[in-house]
Image (cartoon, rainbow, N blue to C red):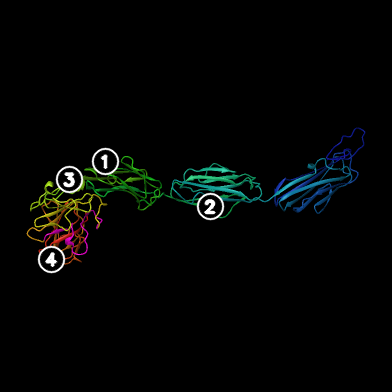
Amino acid sequence: MLSVGLAACGGSSTTPSGAPQAAALNVNETVSTSAVTVGSPVTWTVAMSNSGNAATTSAATLLINVPTALSGLSVVPAGASCNAAGGTMTCTIPAGFAAGASASVTFSGTTTATGTLTSSVQPSGDAAAACDSTADCSTTTTVNALPNVTINSAVNSTNVLVGTPVNWTITATNSGGPTTSPITVTDTWPASGIGIVTVTPAGASCAPIVNGNTLNCTISPGLTSTNGPATIAIATTASSAGSLVNTVSPGTGATCSSGAACTTTTSASVPVAPNVTVSSSVNETSGLVGSAIAWTLTATNSGAGASTAPITLTDILPAADIGSITVTPAGATCTSITGNTLTCTIPAGLAANGGTASVVVATTATAVGTLVNTVAPGSGASCTSTANCTSTTTISSGSQIAGSCGLMTNATTLNNDFGGSTGAMVGLTGLGTTSSAGPDSSNYLVGMGTSGDPVTIESWPGTYNGPASGTMVVAQSGQFICASQNATSASLTGASSTVKYTSDLTNPTSGSPTSLAGNIQISKAQNNPGFVMFNLPSLSNFSFEFFRAGSNGYRLDYSTDGTTWNNIVTTSTSRAACTSDVCDETDLLTTSPSGATSFTATTPITVPVLLRLENINTSGTMVIQKLMIQP
């Protein structure tokens, strides 16, 4: 404000009664806005008034600074005349500007660049002086870039299982100037196939859901790159299999960053479930004291999906009557046995469509009785039936066939039960056994040694270590030699075989085997030829080998009662089909031996059995060096 007497822009004076008359010019500049975006119009107004008590006596001048970052400059003076040159505009108020009169200069343009638009006015001339304050005669307008709001929609997964979360996130990002008007966002989610929906906006507000599967939200003006982005989180769960499509539609002032950015698709499917079943099996359902017992616990996943969590197997072993235990897991881990409980764990990820894990628990039977093993699967598996998870083995002390040559049992039990001592054997009469020709217990007996393998041949009475060097154990007419089970476990095997029942006599050397100590010689066929008899708990496919002295024929029979004999094979009486004086017979229950004249095929025998080998050759003796029997 300008006043006479004070000579100050924007001031006023009080003229005392009788004081001289004077003009007082007031100047003020205003702008239409303090902040705009590029391309927006801006208008400045410079207003002038005479607050004195007299008209001006000379012209007053207004020097106005006009911003240059404008296009389409328009100047509208009222009560003044203006001349614009460059960034400066000079306006003149003629003399005689009456007391109480007013004038104005309005100029406007469209902003062309970001930055700050500053304008000021400087008055001069009659009754005009500097402005009282900068605010009276100066304005500032900030020009911002245009808003650039882009919308994106994202989903937590493109593939989910029914019952698992589906989370959509809508994001509005402004990479330009502040928004000046509200922006609407409309989201449409699947009309079905989802559960309850929860909406969590940040930097936006959302109206209650009243239209089924449509959500309307608003982002208020003022969204910038520094106070954004604005987000809308939408959470639900997949409730059925199918395609879940979510689509966002932005209103005026925003666009999708791309055509695909505002649409998400999630495939929901039914979970693929595992199906793990557990079973227990045992290698023997019946056995003898000393028999090897092996339980196998097996978990099989027949489902279409891998197991998702560890599965525990709790195996209850017999509390007594078994020896030391060996545990061999495959695809599982086991802790130490506590009492008679073994705990094993199958880790998550057991393969679908037939994946298996197993645990083999091996021991030996130590007493007569029943051995029961039961496995209980934990969560994530089941027994297909109670019987499938329980295995039972009946253990007996052995059974004696009437007329046989001994018990089918181990050496320790034989000695303990019948008064023998280590290294010594019990005579046939002590076992209550006879033959049709009467026992010859004073001369010949084949029994079990202290280690179980190889067999020890005893001459009774005689030394415990077998016949004297250079002598032969001989079954003469009407006599027999008895061989019982000669190994207490699968690890006690002869040098020539890995099967349990092996009589590996003295190894051959160069020259005739008939002079070797420890061999068994069976006399040639007479009215009552000699023979070797073997006691076995069972008989499956088997083989044996012997040296021949001359051409040997033989007959091989078996009996399950000691009375009735069944022929396996009878060869020709003069057997020449032997290589280098060694006759090797294989697969005697399934394949006829070379040179056989008769053959009776049979299935494996699972009961106690006697095996009898006779020499039917009339011109020579049979010398046995090695014999292998597979139980």
x, y (%) of residue 133?
A: 81, 41
Image vertical order of residue 15 relative to residue 429, above or below: above
State the residue in front, 373 or 538.
Answer: 538
Q: Is residue 221 left or right of residue 547?
A: right
Can you identify the residue that label 2 sits on?
Answer: 263
What kind of residue is marked 4? Ser
Task: Judge depth for marks 1 and 4 and give the one in front.
Answer: 4
Say whether disc 3 or disc 1 marks the residue closer to the N-terminus: 1
Mark 1, Cα crowd under 10 Å, few <14 / some 14-19 / many 20+, is: few
Give yes or no for residue 282 being in the magenta stretch: no
Q: Quadrant of the N terminus?
A: top right
Can you identify the residue that label 1 sits on?
Answer: 320
x, y (%) of residue 105?
A: 80, 47
Say whether disc 3 or disc 2 marks the residue closer to the N-terminus: 2
Can you identify the residue that label 4 sits on?
Answer: 574
* Res 420 label: 3
